[in-house]
């Protein structure tokens, strides 16, 4: 893969294509925590399997949902150092030796060798809006911009990169909006090539609710709630917005996940997944 494979929107802003002009169909799998929990060999096995099934994108997060700041990855490394106050600091990535970030580098290389893209989420949303997550909340407007700048300097030359801001959390305060916008600005001011930027919203919601103007395409998470069967309504809503933008359902219901995260309602099956796709 090279610069001609970087994704952009088509001239009519309705579809995705490569810079080289090849139309692109988004078929992604979510492996949010693969950087955090899997070895490179395990990731190779996983990506080769996804590739054989037609997937062309994997959605993954740098600062993981599942206690991603304190629990070490497969190689015993954590992503950030602590500052003088004893708090994990996004401006202090730990890059000594074969670090957490070198592992991510290797995964990008591996995905590129398979001609697969990574929709790269800088942080899970509980790191700026904890809600029901583990946290801790570590982001400010200032360190968010620095972190975004550093990520762009490290990964902004990649041809198989898509930026995905947010992280399964709503933007509920002015500070939440400021953090995400600062991260975006840090990214765009420092990446070598211009890459697509989208926003991963909370379940049963869409990016247009939060950042209708700042993203290159709308992305919804129709999600896993009991009423998520109407995911086409979110697609139709975002498709009708102006200005025109491509629309992706970035996280519909999964096979074998409990409906509404409650096993008493039963589990989604392969038929449910196909309905979401159709």
Image: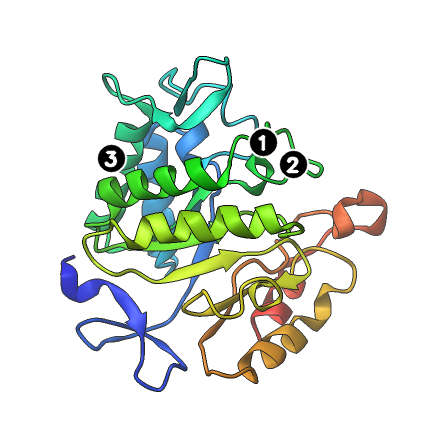
Label 2, residues with CA under 10 Å away: few <14, some 14-19, many ≥20: some
Residue with the mark numbered 1 = 137
Measure how far apart labels 2 and 3 are at the Cα level: 30 Å
* Quadrant housing the C terminus: bottom right
Q: Is residue 206 above or below residue 134?
A: below
Q: Is residue 65 above or below residue 80?
A: below
The mark closer to the camera, 2 or 3, is 2
Judge by depth and name the residue closer to the eye, 141 or 51: 141
Q: In the rendering, which numbered label is found on residue 106? A: 3
Label 3, residues with CA under 10 Å away: few <14, some 14-19, many ≥20: few
- Count up the numbered dots: 3
Measure how far apart labels 1 and 3 are at the Cα level: 28 Å
Q: Position of residue 241 (x, y in %)?
A: 55, 82
Disc 1 secondary structure class: loop
Q: Which badge, 1 or 3, is on the more N-terminal residue? A: 3
Q: Is residue 209 above or below residue 127?
A: below
Judged left or right of residue 148, residue 106 is left
Q: Position of residue 118 (x, y in %)?
A: 35, 51
Residues at discs 2 and 3 in contact (Cβ within 8 Å):
no
Residues at discs 2 and 1 in contact (Cβ within 8 Å):
yes
* Quadrant housing the N terminus: bottom left
Disc 3 secondary structure class: helix
Residue with the mark numbered 2 = 130
Q: Which badge, 2 or 3, is on the more N-terminal residue? A: 3
Q: Position of residue 144 (x, y in %)?
A: 43, 40
Q: In the rendering, which numbered label is found on residue 220? A: none
Judged left or right of residue 111, residue 246 is right
């Amino acid at each position: 893969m090279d610069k001609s494979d970087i994704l952009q929107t088509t001239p009519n802003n309705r579809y995705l294509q490569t810079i080289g002009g090849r139309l692109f169909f988004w078929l992604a799998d979510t492996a949010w925590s693969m950087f955090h929990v899997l070895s490179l060999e395990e990731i190779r096995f996983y990506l080769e399997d996804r590739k054989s099934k037609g997937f062309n994108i994997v959605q993954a997060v740098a600062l993981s949902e599942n206690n991603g700041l304190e629990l070490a990855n497969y190689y015993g490394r954590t992503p950030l150092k602590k500052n003088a106050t004893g708090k994990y600091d996004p401006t202090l990535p730990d890059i000594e030796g074969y670090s957490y970030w070198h592992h991510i580098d290797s995964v990008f290389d591996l995905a590129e060798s398979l001609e697969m893209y990574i929709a790269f989420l800088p942080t899970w949303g509980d790191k700026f809006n904890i809600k029901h997550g583990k946290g801790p909340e570590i982001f400010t407007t200032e360190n968010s911009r620095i972190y975004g700048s550093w990520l762009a300097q490290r990964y902004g030359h990649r041809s198989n990169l898509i930026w995905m801001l947010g992280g399964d959390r709503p933007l509920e305060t002015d500070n939440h909006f400021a953090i995400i916008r600062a991260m975006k600005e840090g990214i765009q001011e420092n990446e070598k090539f211009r890459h697509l930027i989208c926003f991963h919203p909370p379940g049963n919601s869409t990016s247009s609710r939060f950042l209708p103007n700042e993203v290159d395409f709308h992305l919804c998470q129709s999600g896993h709630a009991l009423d998520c069967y109407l995911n086409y309504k979110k697609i139709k809503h975002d498709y009708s917005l102006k200005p025109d933008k491509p629309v992706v359902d970035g996280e519909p219901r999964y096979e074998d996940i409990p409906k509404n995260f409650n096993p008493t309602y039963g589990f989604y099956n392969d038929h449910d997944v196909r309905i979401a796709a159709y």
